[in-house]
Amino acid sequence: MPEEKDLIVDNAYYKNNRIDFKDRKHPLFVGSCGMFRLISRPRLPTYRPRGRLDFQLLYVAHGRAYFYFNGKRQIVNAGNMVLYRPREEQRYYYYGVDRTEVYWVHFTGNDVTNILRKYGFKDHEHVIYTGTSVEYKNLFQRMIEERKGNRTDNEELLVMYLREIFIMIHRLDGEHVTPKNPFLSEEMVHAVAYFHENYRKQISIEEYAAARGMSISWFIRSFKRYTGHTPNQYILSIRISNAQILLETTAYSVQEIASVVGYDNPLYFSRLFHKLCGQSPREFRDQFKEEEKDVEGRKEKDGIEFGE
């Protein structure tokens, strides 16, 4: 078995400065962004009793995280985002046993509150259901890479990526209807948990629906209204997301990874991966290795601050 690191981190800051700030010149401005993935580190805490000067959006892509809002603990599972506003107390924890993967972005500006309202974010709302999607991860990764460089129009492109995330959340909110019947709501929650636990297996949606006493058409329609995706799309997103993690954190071959995430045919898996990620599994792994070398170089130069 390949040796695994206890934590994978990739952060990028405006002018390489980790100090938070408030921008008053632009309606929306991206300050910093990054990701954390716990492999074997037992615990990663963050506590800012006075909060920050800017806004922070965190996307739980895998596992779960433990947040405290007004002194009460709330477990936030994969498929949700958390929004912090300026000066709000921030207290949250990640645990290695959950294999937690989180992407985050800090942003500021002179019109952020109105922009958030425009995209359906409610005042004082902290946890936003988003569903798990490779598209979210790709957008966060693009922001990280863009923030690292100093290319032409990069500030504008960063804002465009962030707005695209806002738009995806807003569209999902418009399509996502939580069933008023508690029984139906419980069925959708059960289905989401079942797919996360069994995505490696060959799941028959028709058999699952029948076993739960639902017609296949009703279940697919209800699940899509609840998550924004059909059951098969949802399972595919989980498989590709976990394949990305294995490509980054292990030395498994593409064929082995395909088998682990539920595909007997590695060629079919590679085609699906390329369709969703824009590159083959091998290209994805090679790109990650290059980015990892760059991250290690920056860590040696000025260190890494954990808990962002």
Image (tube, rainbow, N blue to C red):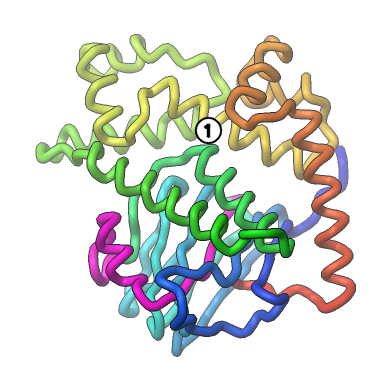
The image position of residue 199, as x and y in percent, is 52, 26
Span colored in magenta: 99-125
Residue plotted at (17% across, 32% down): 184
Q: Residue, x 85% and y 48% (percent of image)?
A: 290
| In this rendering, position of residue 298 left or right of residue 157 | right
- Above or below, 254 against 125 in this view is above
Q: Position of residue 151 (x, y in %)?
A: 71, 59
| Residue furthest to the bottom | 50
Q: Is residue 103 magenta?
A: yes
Does residue 52 show up?
A: no
Looking at the image, residue 293 sits to the left or right of residue 257; the answer is right
Say which of 58 and 146 sits in front: 146
The residue under label 1 is 238
Q: Is residue 22 above or below residue 174?
A: below
Is residue 107 toward the left or the right of residue 250 in the image?
A: left
Question: Residue at left 26%, top 12%?
Answer: 216
Amino acid tagged 1: Ile
Q: Position of residue 129 (x, y in %)?
A: 34, 49
